Image (spheres, grey):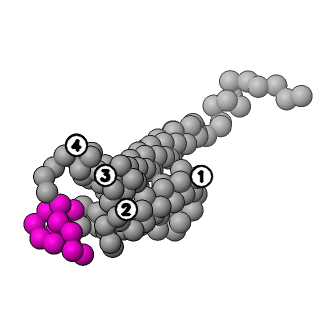
Amino acid sequence: MAQVTDQTVARRPLQRPAAAPIRAMTRTSRSGLALRVLGAISLLVMGAIHLEQYFRVHYSGIPTIGPLFALNFAGAAAVALLLLLPTGRNRVLGSLLAIGGIMMAVTSFVFLFVSEHQRLFGFQEHGYRLAIIIALTAEAAATVFLASYLSVLLRRR
């Protein structure tokens, strides 16, 4: 066994601890995970509101709009559940899911805006009741969270 002396310690080159880059990477991973989960939850809220309106407010009886509400729920639930899976290591899949979620949220927002001002598929919405306010908030939140998540994914090397 070799003896360690002051001379052998002095000859060793100074090394930086390896923990600093790992901490930075972990912080980025955590923020990406948080944004991904928050985006998924926002999509689930958006979809749940559409499903609730489909059954409770009888949008199911409105031609074209009813099926679109059901599809909104199905699509939002599918994308949200896929976002909740551990996709953090797959940038392509994570990016596609984020873009899909953003597109769903923005499309829902635009369709509501259009239906407030003119007939959309033969239907016109009137007023901003609580369900609409919650849906708009969830759509905006999903867009912000998923765009931020996409930004984190694209910055990773």
Marks 2/4: CA–CA distance: 19 Å
Q: Which residue is mark 2?
A: 60
3 or 4: tag closer to the N-terminus: 3
Who's the residue at 39% across and 53% down the image?
Answer: 55
Q: Which residue is mark 3?
A: 57
Please report the bounds of the magenta region as a residue range: 112-125
- How many residues crowd around disc 2 within 10 Å: few (fewer than 14), some, or many (20 or more)? some
Question: In the image, is residue 114 part of the stretch drawn in magenta?
Answer: yes
The answer to whether residue 154 is visible is no
Q: Which residue is mark 4?
A: 130
Marks 2/3: CA–CA distance: 8 Å
Image quarter hosting the N terminus: top right
- How many residues crowd around disc 3 within 10 Å: few (fewer than 14), some, or many (20 or more)? few
Q: Hey, what amino acid is under mark 3?
A: Val
Marks 3/4: CA–CA distance: 13 Å
Q: Hey, what amino acid is under mark 1?
A: Pro
Disc ID at residue 86: 1
Left of 41 or right of it: where is 124?
left
Discs 2/4, front: 2
SS for callout 4: helix
Estimate the x, y position of residue 98 in percent, counting from the top left. Answer: 42, 61
Estimate the x, y position of residue 71 in percent, counting from the top left. Answer: 43, 66
Who's the residue at 52% across and 68% down the image?
Answer: 92
1 or 4: tag closer to the N-terminus: 1
2 or 4: tag closer to the N-terminus: 2
Outermost residue on the left side: it is 117
Discs 2/1, front: 2
- Mark 3 and mark 2 in contact (Cβ < 8 Å)? no
Marks 1/3: CA–CA distance: 36 Å
- Mark 4 and mark 1 in contact (Cβ < 8 Å)? no
